[in-house]
């Protein structure tokens, strides 16, 4: 990717929430840079600080230390100018319940000074959203779709989406992915937070991994998702012989062997063939392969302290 | 876009203002309809024999002759006694400016639009302020309709001024509610603060009026109800000093609220 002025840049961005009894460091010295025209996935478990970062970028909350720049403008001093060029979908979208979808869109378009609602209608049609319904009558998925229309209808240079596909059915998730690819093709930028690996795997160029308020890594997505292991579970007709535990443990790439009656579970790295040959004496009734979870991938990349483990090279474009 | 939020808020609140206004106007009408059925002289005699602090608690003060005229009865029985009920409307509407929407998460959407925080608050406040005029107008209409139906010779200009006198007081309650929302963000905390403000003011006014010559009387000046003075306005018209205190306090609180809201974290 050609390096140019970043769309989003944070410098030691820190947020500490202080209450009478305690202090919570929600975000700790975040140094992050998002380039124009990329889809950047911001990954982490719930409570990692993803939403805090987004709220800081959008000037909904103020940093304890450090600063954020969007389009090269200070996020706090130039919030209005930035908001004009940004589309935002909050993680938990709340809107005026008594208004119809169209009324909400009209109001927001008016505030934005938009007169042409064609784009909003096209988006709604694409997402199969009925704009004549009141917000209170929308399902959570439809409310999410309305949020996407609101975020995208002014064709912003930057989309900031907090858990965008929460509540969307698989077909709509596909449609959303396609929309994001189109946004990228137009040279616009997307910053999306998620705790769903599949979501970022499908559309993101790079991924930042956040944990306990700290950015642990930024990786290109193909590196992150090419983690060469999965969980394999086999169910046999008869009980699995206890001796297999040792036998399978000796096979290269097989580890964490567990046996429970007729069920065998292993962690497999590399090819299937050696494993299948080793169990060929048994009659396999069922075989399931499970992709590793985000947390498992994370642990594969990084040890418990968040330091680099022996895996792919860390992309040196953190800051 | 300047004015968009004002228009949106007004479009979606005028109907509720109309309902509130009709309710309060209906109460005004009923009070005026009931007045001819009352024997003022007997009531005055009864009240006259009560100790001054009880008279003060009733809200008639020392000028019994005027208090027991038809206009005086409207001032005391309607504007004075129902002051707490009048204060409910601006408190409910004031909660909608910040606190309700922040609690619900709607502000997250609004404040990420290209509009300044203070502009959102100010335009919404002005819209709800405009609805106070609907309330005052319907209250006056209720009084006027009552006068027409009963044929009582009421000075309509005095009734109009009394209805107009609601505005500074209701504006202050509206502003205080906005201020509490701007300061605390949480609906329950803001609501508690407003309740304390209104009920506390009412208590100070009542106790201060009853305990003349004591320290409590001095505390009365801290109550916004002391500057409402329904009976005095009906008798002598608007008191510029009282209006100035209420409007001045409202302006100061509004400025402080806008300043506080501009600086704090939203939706935390």
Image (spheres, coloured by chain):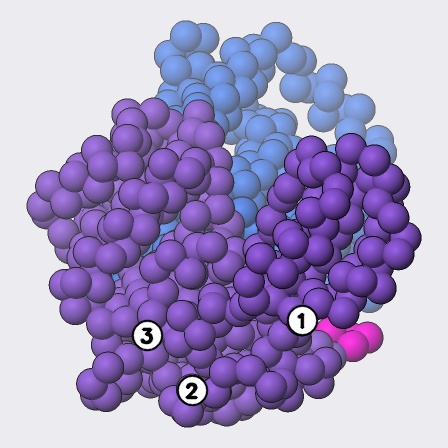
- Pair 1/3: label in front: 1
Residue lying farthest to the front in this orientation: A281
Q: Which chain is drawn using purple?
A: A
Q: Which chain carries label 1?
A: A
Identify the mark nearer the N-term, 3 or 2: 3
As rendered, which of A19 and A312 lies closer to the eye?
Answer: A312
- Identify residue for label 3: A79
Give SS at disc 1: loop
- x and y percent of residue A202 in the render? 38, 57
Name which residue lies at 88% across and 56% down: A243
- Identify residue for label 2: A315
| Depicted A92 relative to depicted B265: above or below | above
Tell me the quarter of the picture where residue A187 sits: bottom left
Name which residue lies at 59% across and 78% down: A301
As rendered, which of B136 and A228 lies closer to the eye?
Answer: A228
- Pair 3/2: label in front: 2
| Depicted A142 relative to depicted A248: above or below | above
| Depicted B146 relative to depicted A251: above or below | above
In magenta, the rendered stretch is: A18-22
Please check whether the numbered discs 1 and 3 fall on a single chain: yes
Q: Does the magenta stretch include residue A19?
A: yes
Residue A212 falls left or right of residue B210: left
């Amino acid at each position: 990717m050609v390096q140019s002025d970043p769309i989003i840049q944070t410098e030691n961005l820190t947020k500490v929430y202080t209450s009478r009894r305690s202090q919570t460091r929600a975000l700790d010295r975040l140094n992050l840079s998002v380039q124009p025209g990329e889809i950047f996935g911001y990954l982490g478990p719930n409570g990692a600080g993803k939403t805090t970062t987004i709220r800081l970028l959008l000037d909904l909350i103020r940093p304890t230390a450090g600063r954020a720049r969007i389009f090269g403008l200070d996020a706090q001093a130039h919030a209005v100018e930035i908001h004009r060029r940004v589309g935002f979908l909050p993680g938990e979208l709340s809107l005026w319940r008594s208004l119809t979808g169209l009324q909400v869109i009209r109001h927001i378009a008016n505030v934005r000074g938009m007169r042409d609602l064609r784009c909003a209608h096209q988006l709604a049609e694409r997402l199969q959203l009925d704009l004549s319904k009141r917000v209170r009558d929308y399902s959570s998925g439809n409310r999410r779709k309305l949020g996407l229309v609101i975020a995208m209808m002014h064709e912003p240079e930057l989309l900031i989406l907090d858990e965008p596909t929460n509540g969307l059915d698989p077909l709509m998730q596909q449609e959303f992915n396609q929309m994001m690819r189109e946004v990228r093709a137009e040279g616009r930028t997307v910053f999306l937070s998620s705790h769903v690996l599949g979501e970022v795997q499908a559309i993101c160029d790079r991924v930042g991994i956040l944990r306990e308020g700290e950015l642990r890594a930024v990786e290109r997505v193909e590196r992150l998702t090419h983690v060469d292991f999965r969980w394999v579970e086999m169910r046999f007709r008869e009980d699995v012989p206890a001796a297999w535990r040792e036998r399978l443990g000796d096979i290269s790439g097989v580890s964490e062997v567990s046996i429970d009656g007729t069920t065998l579970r292993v962690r497999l790295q590399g090819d299937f063939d050696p494993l299948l040959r080793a169990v060929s004496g048994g009659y396999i009734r069922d075989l399931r392969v499970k992709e590793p979870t985000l947390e498992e991938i994370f642990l594969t990349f990084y040890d418990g302290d968040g330091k680099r483990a022996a895996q792919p090279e860390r992309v040196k474009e953190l800051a | 876009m300047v004015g968009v939020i004002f228009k949106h808020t007004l479009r979606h609140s005028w109907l509720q203002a109309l309902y509130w206004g009709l309710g309060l106007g209906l109460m005004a009408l009923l009070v005026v309809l009931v007045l001819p059925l009352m024997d003022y002289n007997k009531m005055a005699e009864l009240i006259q024999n009560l100790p001054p602090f009880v008279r003060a608690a009733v809200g008639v003060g020392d000028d019994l002759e005027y208090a027991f005229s038809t206009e005086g009865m409207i001032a005391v029985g309607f504007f004075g006694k129902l002051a707490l009920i009048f204060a409910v409307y601006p408190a409910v509407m004031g909660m909608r400016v910040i606190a309700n929407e922040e609690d619900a998460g709607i502000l997250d959407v609004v404040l990420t639009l290209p509009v300044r925080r203070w502009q959102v608050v100010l335009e919404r406040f002005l819209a709800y302020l405009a609805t106070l005029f609907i309330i005052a107008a319907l209250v006056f209409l209720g009084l006027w309709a009552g006068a027409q139906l009963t044929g009582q010779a009421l000075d309509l200009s005095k009734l109009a001024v009394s209805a107009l006198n609601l505005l500074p007081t209701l504006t202050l309650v509206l502003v205080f509610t906005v201020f509490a929302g701007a300061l605390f963000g949480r609906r329950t905390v803001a609501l508690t603060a407003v309740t304390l403000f209104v009920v506390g003011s009412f208590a100070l006014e009542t106790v201060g009026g009853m305990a003349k010559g004591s320290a409590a009387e001095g505390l009365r000046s801290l109550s916004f109800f002391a500057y409402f003075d329904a009976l005095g306005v009906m008798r002598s018209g608007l008191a510029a000093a009282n209006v100035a205190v209420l409007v001045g306090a409202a302006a100061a609180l509004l400025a402080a609220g806008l300043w506080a809201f501009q600086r704090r974290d939203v939706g935390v």
